Amino acid sequence: MVPILSESVFPHDLLIPLRLHMKNPSSSSARDLFLMKEMSKYDKKESTAQEVFLSDVMPGNTFLLAGRKFKKGETRRTRILCEEVDTGKKFLVSTLAKVKPLD
């Protein structure tokens, strides 16, 4: 992969996370939070601009995900324990989920 990881192929800001990822690649690029955040800068802006990664929301703050209101709880490895405000049910949500912060 070294010949491909150059500025003639990829933008400069993607090269660092790509090189780090390629040293010890996981089974999916979606498992690499740093790489996914950098790659998301190049996504088409079809969704609302207020959406952020769940990992960027402060613990205890509320957010909307799929039209439902949640409160962010503790982080457990690659997922975050979130409580649905209306029902009190708890769900494990990926740190890479795009959410709309309410606080």
Image (cartoon, grey):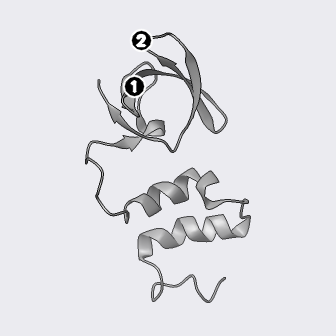
Question: Of 67 and 6, which appears nearest the observer?
Answer: 67
Quick one: label 2, few (<14), some, or many (20+) residues within 10 Å?
few
Q: Position of residue 16 (x, y in %)?
A: 53, 68
Along the horizontal axis of the image, is 49 left or right of 98? left
Mark number displayed over residue 86: 2
Q: Residue at x 42, y 14 (%)?
A: 85
Q: Amino acid at mark 2?
A: Asp
Mark number displayed over residue 68: 1
Along the horizontal axis of the image, is 46 left or right of 22? left
Instruction: Confirm or deny contact between disc 1 and disc 2 (CB under 8 A).
Output: yes
The image quadrant of residue 52 is top left
The image quadrant of residue 68 is top left
Q: Residue at x 59, y 55 (%)?
A: 30
Q: Position of residue 33 (x, y in %)?
A: 56, 51
Mark number displayed over residue 52: none
Question: Of 51 and 8, which appears nearest the observer?
Answer: 51
Q: Position of residue 56 (x, y in %)?
A: 42, 38
Question: Of 64 and 40, which appears nearest the observer?
Answer: 64
Along the horizontal axis of the image, is 13 left or right of 81? left
- 26 vs 12: above or below: above
Quick one: label 1, few (<14), some, or many (20+) residues within 10 Å?
few
Q: Residue at x 43, y 22 (%)?
A: 70
Q: Quadrant of the N terminus?
A: bottom right
Q: Amino acid at mark 1?
A: Arg
User: Which one is earlier in the sequence, the residue at label 1 or at label 2?
Assistant: 1
Badge 2 marks a residue whose secondary structure is: loop
The image quadrant of residue 102 is top left
Q: Quadrant of the C terminus?
A: top left
Disc 1 and disc 2: Cα gap in Å?
A: 8 Å
Q: Residue at x 62, y 61 (%)?
A: 29
